[in-house]
Amino acid sequence: MPRSSGKRTLHFYNKSGDLDKVVEFLEKIQQKVNYINLTAQVEDSCRDIKVTLMGSRSRDLQNLAIGRIKDLARRIFELA
């Protein structure tokens, strides 16, 4: 059975380009998802946000983190 690298990348788009929303989003991720390694990259005048999760041996932990991050993005960036 092939194993995946344990690396997942999520992309979010900040329609407003508001830096305060990006900072709030990243701070909330730091508070709510502290059980898995991740990196965040912000590009294009604070509009494109890429969050990469890595290093977890448990797929369940990754899925939990992904759910929490997507929920935060919906609330902060008002995604449908």
Image (spheres, rainbow, N blue to C red):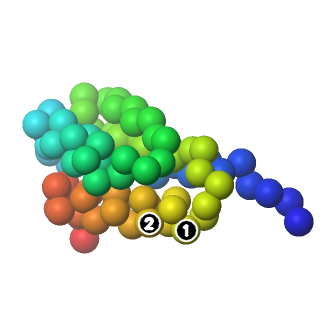
How far across and down, in percent of the image, does residue 67 sit? 39, 66
Q: How many marks?
A: 2
Q: Amino acid at mark 1?
A: Asp
Would you name the residue on which mark 1 appears? 60
Give residue 73's quadrant in the image: bottom left
Pick whichever, 20 or 38, lies toward us: 38
Asked which secondary structure carries label 2, the reply is helix
> Tag 2: Cα neighbours inside 10 Å, few (<14), some, or many (≥20)?
few
Give the answer, above or below, for where 45 lies relative to 30: above
- The residue under the point 25% across, 33% down is 46
Q: Is residue 59 left or right of residue 23?
A: right
How far across and down, in percent of the image, does residue 37 sit? 49, 41
Q: Is residue 22 left or right of residue 69?
A: left
- The residue under the point 74% across, 55% down is 4
> Tag 1: Cα neighbours inside 10 Å, few (<14), some, or many (≥20)?
few
Pick whichever, 2 or 21, lies toward us: 2
Give residue 45's quadrant in the image: top left
- The residue under the point 65% across, 55% down is 57
Would you name the residue on which mark 2 appears? 64
Give the answer, above or below, for where 69 lies relative to 49: below
Q: Is residue 50 visible?
A: yes
How far across and down, in percent of the image, does residue 41 sit? 39, 32
Q: Amino acid at mark 2?
A: Leu
